[in-house]
Amino acid sequence: MVILEKSLLSYYSKLPFAKNFPFDPEKKPFYPVLTDNHYAYIFDMSAKDAAAAQVYPSYKVYKAKQKAASEELQKLLKSLGRN
């Protein structure tokens, strides 16, 4: 069975990350693709907090937060002797 391009566009254009296009890494809000981990993270949040956790002010801010989180994790692992 082949899924028609029209069906794919119809489905994916309704997801939050579709708002990223046209892409502007500095001026537009950024909506990352929501994964199972994200849904586990927001599972018990209020609707307002969950909505806020699904968007970043920009892609640039998103990347900076991802980098800071990665560095923090590496620092923690190193302090535990697990690096």
Image: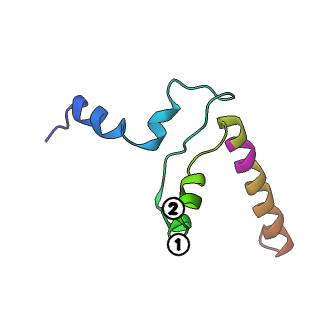
- Residue reaching furthest bottom? 80
Q: Nearer the viewer, residue 81 or 7?
A: 7
| Residue 43 place in picture, x, y as percent | 50, 69
Which quadrant of the structure image shows residue 69? bottom right
Q: Is residue 2 left or right of residue 77?
A: left
Q: Amino acid at mark 1?
A: Asp
| Residue 65 place in picture, x, y as percent | 73, 49
Helix, strand or loop status at disc 2: helix
At x 66%, y 36%, the residue is 58
- Mark number for residue 44? 1
At x 67%, y 39%, the residue is 57
Q: Gap between marks 2 and 1, in whole Å?
A: 9 Å
At x 48%, y 40%, the residue is 17
Of badges 2 and 1, nearer the viewer stands 2
What residue range appears in magenta?
62-66
> Dominant secondary structure of the magenta stretch?
helix
Question: Disc 2 marks which residue?
Answer: 47
Image quarter hosting the C terminus: bottom right
Q: Are marks 2 and 1 in contact (CB under 8 Å)?
A: no
> Does the magenta run of residues contain 63?
yes
